[in-house]
Structures are given as structure tokens and as C-alpha cells.
Image: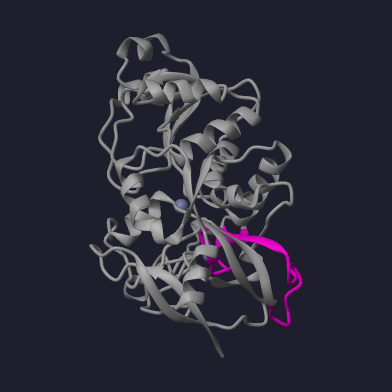
Amino acid sequence: MTIKALGYAAQHSFSRLKPMEFEREEAGAHEVQIDVLYCGVCHSDVHQAENDWANTVYPCVPGHEVVGRVAAVGAGVTLHKVGDLVGVGCMIDSCRSCEPCHAHEEQYCEGPNSWLATYNGPMVPAAKAPDGRNMYGRDNTYGGYSNVVVVKEDFVLKIPASLPIEAAAPILCAGVTTFSPMKHWGVKAGDKIGVLGFGGLGEMALKIARALGAEVTMFTTTEEKIAEATKLGAKGVLESDTEALKSLARTFDFILSTVPEKHKADPFIPTLKRNGTFVAVGELGPMPGYNNQEVIMHRRSLAGSLIGSIAETQEILDFCAKHQIAPDVEVIPIQDINKAYKKVKSGDVRFRYVIDMASLKQEMAEA
Ligand SMILES: [Zn+2]
Ligand SMILES: [Zn+2]
């Protein structure tokens, strides 16, 4: 049995997002049907819709920062019940049998098709799988820019009641993507942290690191953003200020780069302490070279990190609720999505756009 759904989709790499009717499978025994209330707009959504990673399956219904209410549950569901406020992040399933899956790090799933993304299907499509198989039985998945999603119950997160609903959405990707490396590399109270890039991810990184008790320095490109960083309790430094960078030599325990494009790590490596780590989470492609002498001389590390596990996603939702931190969001109707994409691409949006899905339901009612 299927249910009718409406979403906003890109039909090819240079098309605007437009309404698209499609069908979803009804919730199976261990699945939950969620009535979508809000969906965050992530920079990856733009990359994927425009095929920047050369792996987009069209039509593409983006959206992996989904908050909604459980509308129906399968017969075997025990974790959620109808009416619960829940979230869905970047993943909706994984192979469940590889070493990373057993270690509860599904985002590094090494199964033949890796994990099943909330949109754009399995991370490793059948054509690239070792035996040409697709264990999930589907080549594409449609994300949260829609009225309804159906997800395996153990990939559904609980949204704490004390979080503002619309602000909870970006925690599901931007929040966990910045939290997971901080947790892995053991960021703690008293640490000095640098953050590169002051967009949706950078802002979450700042707030989470501060709540962990770290001292935060934001590297950014404009004086305006320095003022914003100061307001949020961080120091701001212009990336282009070579004197300031020099004065920060051997300062940071950890630097998180959230810059969503190719960029140099080189100017920042000398600002790491001995054993310090520079982690880039924003760019999924080749990065420029760096001077390895600076890495060797102080046993520094350069690293990467991919989103976060389901357990970490729940942990950061609960952490944000406990510390009353939430991303700055601007709520938009889905009809404004193409305008929002333009602004996200220009890189000048510090807050996160969040789509109010009531606007889609309104559109459905009028159709
Ligand atoms: Zn994302
Ligand atoms: Zn796996």
C-alpha cells in the first residue's frame, strides 16, 4: 500500500525546485509515518539539487533536517507512538551488520550500499556496489521538503519538549555534524577552539563548544560577523588578518572548519597547539596542499568527520535542550525555497532557513 505525498523537487541540475506529487510506501512493521512540520535548509541540499557531487538521482526532493509528528506506526513499533514530536536527520537506514554499524557509527557504514540517505537514496548506489545489488530495494529516496516521510523507528529521534520546534530542525544535521567531531576529539571545558566559517554549521559549533565550556575563536571574513561572534560570547578574527593569525600561534586544541568549499588549512595549522587537530567537515572534495613541516613539528593532525551517529544526534538534541541552545533560524514558506537557495549559495546567510511545512499543506488544500 502507498500513501500520496507532495514535495518540492529538482528535476535536473539546473531546474528550480517545483511541486511534485509522488507516492511513499506505507509504514512497515518497524516504521513510523511522520507528518512533517518543519524542515531545515542545509547547504548540502543545494549541492545535491544542483548535482555538485555528480551523484544526484533525479527527481531530487531534498531535506534532512526534518521535524514532525508521528501520524501512524507499524505493528512492531515500540520506540514511538502516534502524536510524538520526532526528528529525522541525514540517515534513514544502514546495513546493520558491518563493524561501524555494530559500533553504532552508522554514518560510516561499510555495507555494500553504505547507509540509506534521507534523500538521494543509498550512499553507494547499485551501479557502484561490489555485487551490483541494492540492499535497500530503492535507488532514490525523497527527503523532508514534503508533507510526509516514512522512516525505520530506530532512525527516528525524539525532540525534547523544551526545544523550540522550528529551531530543533537544524540540530539534526548542522548540530550533530559539529558535535560529533568535538565529542570524538574530546573537546572539554577550558579548551581553546577555533571555528572556521560562520554559517549555519559555524554558529552551531560556536554555541555547542561554549556550552561544553570551551573558549571559542571564530575565524570569519567580515567585520559584521566578528560583531555577531562577540555577541555570542566568542572572539572574532578576520581570516585575512595575518598579524592576528601570527599572534595566535600554538593557541588551539582543536579547530573545526565548516567552510562548505575548497579552502586552505595552511594558514591555520600553525595556530594549533602540540597534538592539536584541524577537522574539516564542510568540503567533500579535494583540498589544497599544506606544509607538512608545520604538522610534523608539533605532532598536529588534519582530519575529517561525517555528520554523526543516530545516538550522537539524540545526544546533541538532549544537550541543546538542557543548555537551552538553539540555532538562529528564519522560517520561510516552501514557495520561497528557490530564493533561499540563492542566498545560501552566496554564503552570506548566518542563520539557518527552516521551511514551515504548513505552507505546503496550504498549497495542497488550494490545488
Ligand atoms: Zn545537512
Ligand atoms: Zn553498516
The picture places residue 188, in percent across and down from the top left corner, at 64, 28
Identify which residue is drawn at 74% across, 51% down: 161
In the image, farthest residue toward the bottom: 1
Q: Give the range drawn in magenta.
A: 73-102
Q: Nearer the viewer, residue 123 or 366?
A: 366
Q: Which residue is drawn at 40% across and 23% down?
A: 224
Picture coordinates of residue 65 (x, y %)?
A: 52, 56
Q: Residue 269 sits in which quadrant? A: top left
User: Which secondary structure class fits the magenta region best?
Assistant: loop
Task: Tell me how the rendering is colored.
Answer: one colour
Specify the quadrant that holds the C terminus: bottom left
Q: Does the magenta stretch include residue 271?
A: no
Q: Nearer the viewer, residue 38 or 58?
A: 38
Q: Residue 234: in sight, yes or no?
A: no
Whole-percent x, y for residue 98 in the image: 55, 65
Q: Please determine whether, in this image, residue 224 is positioned above or below residue 79.
A: above
Q: Position of residue 221 (x, y in %)?
A: 34, 26
Q: Is 264 situated above or below 351?
A: above
260 vs 355, left or right, is left
Is residue 325 something that shows in the picture? yes
> In this picture, is 16 found above or below 222?
below
Return the residue found at the far front. 366
